[in-house]
Image (cartoon, rainbow, N blue to C red):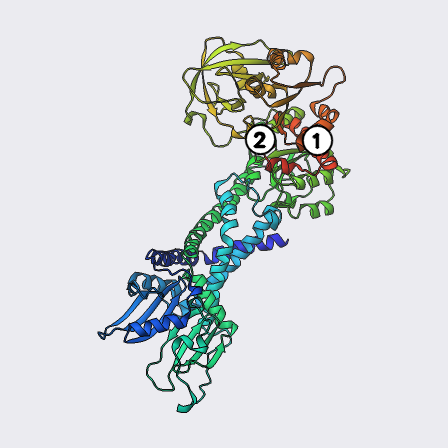
Amino acid sequence: MIRSVWRYSHLILAVVSSIFLLLAAVTGGILAIEPISNATKNYSITGLDEILVSQTIDRLKSNYDEVLELEVIPSNYVIASVLTKDFENKTIYIDPINLSEFGPVEERSSFFNFITNFHRSLFLKSAGRIFVGIISFLLCLIAVTGLLLLIKRQGGSLKLFHRVKETNFEQRYHVVLGRWFLVPIIIISATGVYLSAEKFELFPSYSVKHNRNEIAQDEYEQKEISEFPGLKNISLDQVRKIVFPFSEDLEDFYQVQLNDREMLIHQFSGKVVSAQKYPLVQLGSILSMKLHTGESSPVWAFILLISSGSILFFMYSGFAMTLKSLNRKKATTFGYALRDEAEYIVLVGSETGNTFDFANRFCKSLKSHDKRVHLSSLNEYATYERAHKMVIFTATYGDGDAPASANHFLKRFEQINPKHLIEYTVVGFGSMLYPNFCSYAENVHEKLDFHPSFKPMMQLTKINEQSFEQFRGWANNWGAKADIPVHLELPDSSFTKKKTEDLKVIDISKLNVDNTFLLKLKPQKKIQFQSGDLLGICPPDARRERLYSIAEIDRYILLSIKNHELGKCSGYLSSLEKGQIIQGKIEKNLKFHFPVTAPSVIMICNGTGIAPYLGMIQKNNNANIHLFWGGRYTQSFDLYQTYVDNALKERNIRSLEIALSREGEQHYVQDLLLEKQDFLVSSIENGAVIMICGSISMQNGVMEVIGNLLQSRSNLKMSDLEINGQLKLDCY
């Protein structure tokens, strides 16, 4: 509930102030260029803290007929207003040590004056200043709420700079730039509010009032400036401005404005006539002016410049994400059956709308088979008159919380009693970078599992980083159990628009006991690829491609393919003949390349998932590779026997473990891991890389085993493996 308040506040504030924020950001960015431009003059003086004010004044009075003012601006430029012995008034940049003149202080550009006036008041005078102050306040609130949402999304303030796993451009860089620029934006907006409030006297009024004690002519002893007690130990870095006495009248004093106070110093004796510390309000004004304008440092001015640019990006990306989310939900829920007419209920928990996109593809497939499907958010959970199956797709927000469209689901679930038994399936979406990977999906699955009116159709499935291949693997498994062929529409990526390569069929094996075969292809021209990359193939009568993991052996492409009964692509490939030319597109799969520096590699796979490993182990020279494979029958492994036997003979792999689910002890690859748990945990703690390739159901089982072992026997977590680069996945 609290997060929703922050979220809607963040959005509403952005919408209300958008046009004026746009103008303020553009003009603020332009004004930030001015101090950067001024810094190119290279008049900055280093070591001001070592130069005494008394020495500088003494030198000035010796070199010029009259000195009017001495000023030190935030960029460490020293400015003197003087009258030369030729009676010429000059305001110049000087070196306070040798009094060399760098150049005159030029009048400010009319362009920057114009932009400043517009930035301050939009040319609306006092009313404009008030409005700009309000917009600054709104920007401050937007930045604060954005920072709170960002901390929540990342799972806490300590994880603020952990790796960002968002793949959508707007969403990813809204987070990435937010981590770096929200604090500078808060400073910009807060100082803008302060300066506006000061302008309209909303703070307690202040003015420096000196006690000008009357000093008789005989009460002072004239001293050299270098011996002035009032200037003793005051260096130039403490000075903002010094106004020199206009005459030799006893009532004329040195007016010394320091960073924290203002003093009147007797022009003959050097005594402090009056010293007044600045009130907190004025100190805030001085600091706000430095921070808001960037005058204090060209580096800070540059930060202001790119922060202003980031505001423009935040406006674009924020509105783009909001519109996409609204459009996704509107588009995905339109055209489906009403909840009391539907046989299949699909509920979605989504933060940004991406999960709705996956759900919509699934629902479209069901609808193509004339199934009555109802699609809505988890927050709209209710009773369903005719439904007999429910599928829940949900993301996890931040540190294991419900996403925006599911934050009321658990409460509603407790209050609503279903009218009849429903089979359910839960699919979680998330990133393994986070310790609470898909934990909200786990929570939902557990709630339904304990309810007498719900029966699990499948175990909880977790999709990492919105992998479409993993999602398609789950959909195939669900379709097999529901006896509904699920054909998912691929993400908008037309195969015909990609550059394809001619591939010649060199060899194709016969189907084995699992209807699996090996296909060997030779690229007709030199192309770059390696084991673990993907080959996209689109049958002649199809519009979308199917991706297969590649084994690169002697510059040939080796694929392991299961011929599915209704599979267009696998059926097409199984019918190929030697010498035939087909079209394919190589896609780099950097996340699943063989690790170069790992002390050991544990390769886990089932079925055709062994394919990329066949190429990797052939090229291995020094890594300790341990291969775990799961299949149905002993004969299932015959396709790969020669490759693996050669690898064992050449010591390219150190060990091979096989699990058969339809023969002998009838166990799975995750059972092998439990049998070898001492070896597995020890290897992981010593830096081993775990590679998993195969079906999504196998991945879920393996991940659960490894996660449980680490939780009970190690200080490491699954998220640590992801962060350390010890986990590589290519499942479908």
Viewer-closest of 45 and 153: 45
Report how far apart the C-alphas of labels 2 and 1 lie in the structure: 46 Å
Task: State the image coordinates of residue 723 (x, y, percent, origin top left).
Answer: 59, 38
Q: Is residue 631 visible?
A: yes
Viewer-closest of 97 and 654: 97
Instruction: Indicate which label's residue lies in the foreground, 2 or 1.
Output: 1
Tell me the tag on residue 39: none
Task: State the image coordinates of residue 533 (x, y, percent, origin top left).
Answer: 51, 24
Q: Are marks 2 and 1 in contact (CB under 8 Å)?
A: no
Q: Is residue 392 above or below residue 584?
A: below
Task: State the image coordinates of residue 594 (x, y, percent, origin top left).
Answer: 55, 25
Task: State the image coordinates of residue 170 (x, y, percent, origin top left).
Answer: 48, 43
Q: Residue at x 62, y 26 (%)?
A: 600
**Sequence-earlier tag: 2 or 1:** 2
Q: Residues within 10 Å of mark 1 (few under 14, many from 20)?
A: some
Q: Amino acid at mark 1?
A: Val
Q: Is residue 453 visible?
A: no
Q: Residue at x 44, y 62 (%)?
A: 292
Q: Is residue 639 above or below residue 478?
A: above
Q: Residue under circle 2?
A: 367
Q: Residue under circle 1?
A: 681
**Which of the 4 image quadrants contains residue 703?**
top right
Q: Secondary structure at mark 1?
A: helix
